[in-house]
Each structure stands twice: as structure tokens, then as C-alpha cells.
Image (spheres, rainbow, N blue to C red):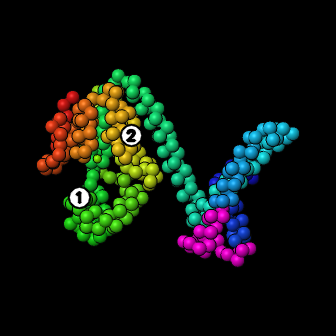
Amino acid sequence: MIEDVPIDWLFGIQKRFGKEFFKAQGLDLDVLIKGLEGDKLDWNKEYILAMSRKVNGLLDNFDWKMHATTDQQTIQDNLLEDIVDIVKYTIAIAILNGFDTKDFIRKFDEKSTVVDAKFRQQQTIEKLKKSTHPIALIDIDGVIAQYPKPLMTYFALQVGDEEWIDKQPSDFLRHNPTLFHELKREYRLSGRKSQVPIVPGIRTFMNWLKSNEYTIVLLTARPYDKIYRIYADTLKFLSENNIPYDCIIWNENKGQYAVEHLGSANVEFAIDDEVLNANEFAYNGIRSYLFNPSGEEVSGVLPDVHVIKNFVEVTI
Ligand SMILES: [Mg+2]
């Protein structure tokens, strides 16, 4: 019966038990799920505390001396039972908070992609330090992905005023700081980051770099550690747009991070759409391009920075 256990089966058992359990407390699980605070908050805490105790208890399974009199088979069976118990609590908490198996599988898949990519990124950076291939550092937002127009279009749509489309995020921030942060968070959570259009000419340029054996390192300050799905959305965006790359550096201070970790590597140039980052590269002796497609005057640019309107101006 349980040879091929679908996750629906696990959730089904746990949900049936949850319904009976809460009924015995005079509560309705379906009502609890829809609630926001009160009982639901308390039961979340109960579950989490109980699960934490179980997680700590897992360690006891490895205190072999204490189990000197217990046989190996019993130890293994106890360990498995503790693991299953933790999974049962995990599913119970998921159900209590309104998640179903589809949500669970989707997030499991996203998280696995992220864990895998992070692991490979660390390995790649170590390899890059020793590489003799030239390295190109390319910013994502504003160089590969169009920015800020897609974000401003979203703002305009939400507030019902088209005028915002051609303005800057800083204008909206000044206009209404609370709404700015709220909408930006909503935008990031909506998955729209994976569907942003690419900057014209960038794919040709990236393919050219690849065919000339450049190692392509992408840079981004996107806050994937605060909004988890940004990581998976970014990978999806790159893959669906066939953007070649070797690794992504995720860091709030990406310029500084790249200089610190790859400063001694074979970095040939960097492209960024923000003056501060372009200056940082130039200041640290990296050939730096400031991508400024509008061609409007920019101030505060260090003399060593090359301001370009088009990728064909990159002379390497
Ligand atoms: Mg940028």
C-alpha cells in the first residue's frame, strides 16, 4: 500500500489526525487555518516547541555510550522514528498555516535549486581565483535585466497613474516611502522578477564573451536572503532568456565583494549601471564601464570609468 508514497498521502494522514485532534479541543482545523492570530498563533508555538524538543532529542540517538546495552537495530529504529516524528510536526505546521502539497513541492524544488546553485557558486569562485581565462563582471539589474522600467510599470499599475512609468524609483520613494517598500516587496514576491525583459543587445554581447572564452561572473544585490524566491526567479529569468554565465555573486555590496574575492584574479573588466559600483571597480584598478543607455548626463563618475550607451562600445 505504501510502496509508492505520494506526499498527498502523508499530508492526508496528518490532516485527518489534525481535524480530530482540534475537534477534541473544541476547535475546527479549517477555521484555524483561515485565522491570523489567537488560537492559530498559540498552536503554531505549541507545535514548534514540541518539534524543537524532538530535534534536540535526535542527538541522543548518536550518544552511543548511553546506548551501550541497546542493539544496533533498536538504535536505527529509534532514530527513524524520531525523524518521522519531526516530519509529522513539519507537515502539521504546514497544514495549520494553509499550505498544501502543491505549495510544498514547489517550494522544495525552488529551495533545492537555490542550495545547489549556492554550493556550485562557492566552488566556482575558488576555481576562478586560479583561472587564466579573462573574467567579465556583469551586473544583472539595469545591464542584463531592464531596470527600473518594469518596477515603475508595476508601481504605475498599482496606483493607477501611468505617469510613474517613466520616473525613477527614488521619485516614488520620496512620494510615499511606506507604499514604496510595500509595493516593492509585493513586486518581488509576485514572481515578476523572472519575467522582466532583457536589455537590447545584451544576449549578443554575452554570447560573444562566451565564444571568446570569457568567464562570466554576474553580480547582483538582490536580497535573496530576505525574499527567498528571488534566487529561483533570477535563475529562471537567466535560463529562459538563454543568458550564458559561469556564476553569480550575490551580495548587498556586490562591487566590494567582487573586488575582495576576485581582485587578485584575472578580471578584465566590469559593467554596471550604477555610478557608485562603476567607481568602486575603477578605484580598485578594474577596467570599468558605466552602462548609461539613456545617454543623459551622469555626475560623480571617476575619470577612469568609461561611460557607454551600447555594449558595442566595450573595447576589449
Ligand atoms: Mg544594477
Name the quadrant containing residue 304.
top left
- Residue 254, how many percent across, how many down? 34, 42
Q: Residue at x 32, y 40 (%)?
A: 255
Tell me which corner region of the image, top left, top right, bottom left or bottom right, holds residue 287.
Answer: top left
Q: Position of residue 145 (x, y in %)?
A: 30, 48
Residue at the image point whose x is 37% and y is 65% from the top: 182
Quarter of the image for residue 44 reads bottom right
The C terminus - image quarter: top left
Q: Amino acid at mark 2?
A: Ile
The residue range painted magenta reads 23-47
Q: Which tag, 2 or 1, sits closer to the chain's start? A: 1
Answer yes or no: is residue 165 visible: no
Q: Would you say 157 lies left or right of 235 here?
A: left
168 versus 225 height, above or below:
below
Secondary structure of residue under mark 2? strand
Q: Main secondary structure of the magenta part?
A: helix
Q: Amino acid at mark 1?
A: Gln
Which one is nearer the viewer's eye here, 104 or 179? Answer: 179
Query: Which residue was labeled with disc 1?
Result: 168
| Left or right, 261 with reference to 98 | left
Q: Residue furthest bottom?
A: 26
Residue depicted at 74% across the width and 74% down the height: 24
Label 1: few (<14), some or many (≥20) within 10 Å? some
- Residue at 20% of width from left, 60% of height from top? 166
Q: Which element is circle 1 on? A: loop
Q: Which residue is tagged 2?
A: 249
Which label belongs to residue 213? none
Residue 232, position in %: x, y? 44, 48
- Assess whether residue 185 is covered by the magenta stretch: no
Given residues 224 and 176, the one toward you in this image is 176
- Above or below for 78 versus 92: above
Residue 24 part of the magenta segment? yes
